[in-house]
Image (cartoon, coloured by chain):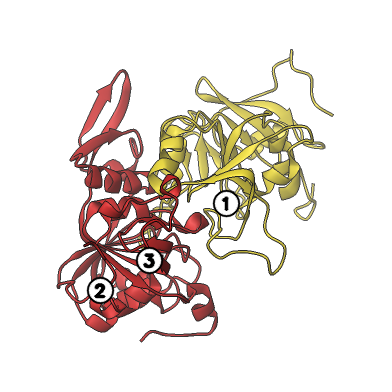
Chain colours: A yellow, B red
Amino acid sequence: MTDTEVVGLTRSEMAARAALDIPDGAYVNLGIGIPEMVAGYVPEGREVIYHTENGLLGMGPSPEEGTGDPELINAGKRQVTAIDGASFFHHADSFVMIRGGHIDLCVLGALQVAQNGDLANWSTGGPDAIPAVGGAMDLVAGVKTIHVITQHTTRAGEPKLVGACTYPLTSPGVVDRIYTDLAVIDVVDDAFQVVELSPGVNFDYVKEHTAGELLPIPPDVLEVE
Amino acid sequence: MIDKRVTSADDAVADIVDGATVMVGGFGEAGSPIELIHALIDQGSTGLTVVNNNTGSGEVGLAALIKAGRVAKMICSYPRTANSTVFPELYRSGKTALDLVPQGTLAERIRAGGAGIPAFYTATSVGTPLEEGKERRTIEGRDYVLEYGLTADFALIKCVRADYHGNLVFNKTARNFAPVMATAARTTIVQTVEVVSPGGLDPECVVTPGIFVDRIVTVSDPALESELVAQGVSYP
């Protein structure tokens, strides 16, 4: 393979793959970036309610040009809409939903994920970095299931799936599943378990780009075409 | 007779003293009481500790208060936002201190402060750098850290409609921290788009009961932070 060849899924294909695993009837919080795109790919026939931690349950898509309200925004401070049946609430109630275990699923980005499920996604810990955490630590500590969407490596080609995080943690041992451009990977028993390879990607290629312990697809699981 | 209306934003913030702790509502520009903040800049008090989720944007509102050198310490969850350039400079030069608090912990600390709860345990921040210096306790097999309730001398918040007893109704996601801040401050100052007489709000729909509110200022056409930033406005 040459460096210019595109391997694996695009950002929107990653979002679409993650959307397949969102169950009907779920209350879901989506992080900023690729996770935000997931809402657009949930299969028809499933009703999913989106929560945004700044006080809205029942978040809809971006408003049409010129119809938005600057006081109706998501956690990324972008204008959104409210669906029929939505509700507004204050911040303490919003985090009651999160910390109290009422939100079923959170999909968010990552700087690093360790093979024991540790997540680092808020700071690179650089001496000149302005630390900013937002709601990330509350979300991963409180939401029942944590899914991560991330490129498999950094722009510089460094693995983001690692044996142990070198960046400051958001929370230890919280990640359940990771969707990358190369594979779908579960965190099991202190290892990365590949459950699905992206089209045209083989296990050895994923292993080459992973720093932690990576287990191949178990033989009893059929590879998805 | 109860009538919490004051004639101007300037009058409303006149007694905020140097060194006061001031909670400021808003998540980004949604709910930011920009006219009250500008009145506070004009008023001149300094050495303030300010509680807000962010640190403002551009050079208006909260960012302008920080830029004017009035804020000794920010307590917030996310000081990095698009167009947020004022705070990073002052933070790096050591002129403004930062107490970084996870967003849900910040909301609950304010709620607890307003509710007379001195402290509580939460799993948020366990095993992270933000746990440093906090008491840890294991409860039913899970680790938690002790967080303290947060109160303030003043809260500055924005709503869309109030009656002059201080009952408040908010606009969409502009509600955010305002209702809990109103409970946690000794003096809560509200800017509202509209004031009605008692009876003009449906009691079933009141979000903040008037007992938590001290002063109401009508700002019928509040400025929008993003519009001011787009126009390149620098306050004052």
- Which chain is home to disc 3? B
- Residue type for callout 3: Thr
Q: Is residue A152 left or right of residue B90?
A: right
Rendering coords of residue A112 (x, y %)? 51, 43
Q: Which mark is residue B12?
A: 2
> Mark 2 Cα within 10 Å, few/some/many (few <14, many 20+)?
many
Rendering coords of residue A71 (x, y %)? 53, 62
Quarter where residue B131 is shown: top left
- Which chain is home to disc 1? A
- Residue type for callout 1: Ile
Q: Quadrant of the C terminus of chain A?
A: top right
**Residue depicted at x 69% and y 17%:** A218
- Element carrying mark 2: helix
When the figure is inspected, residue A192 is found, relative to residue B99, above or below; the finding is above
- Given residues A95 and B130, the one toward you in this image is A95
Q: Which residue is mark 3?
A: B55
Quote the CA–CA distance across marks 3 and 2: 22 Å
- Given residues A7 and B181, the one toward you in this image is B181
**Residue depicted at x 49% and y 30%:** A102
User: Which mark is nearer the camera, 3 or 2?
Assistant: 2
- Element carrying mark 1: loop
Q: Earlier in the sequence, mark 3 or mark 2?
A: 2
> Same chain for the residues at labels 2 and 1, yes or no?
no
When the figure is inspected, residue A216 is found, relative to residue A30, above or below; the finding is above
User: Which mark is nearer the camera, 2 or 1?
Assistant: 2
Quote the CA–CA distance across marks 1 and 3: 19 Å
Rendering coords of residue B41 (x, y %)? 28, 80
Q: Which residue is mark 1?
A: A32
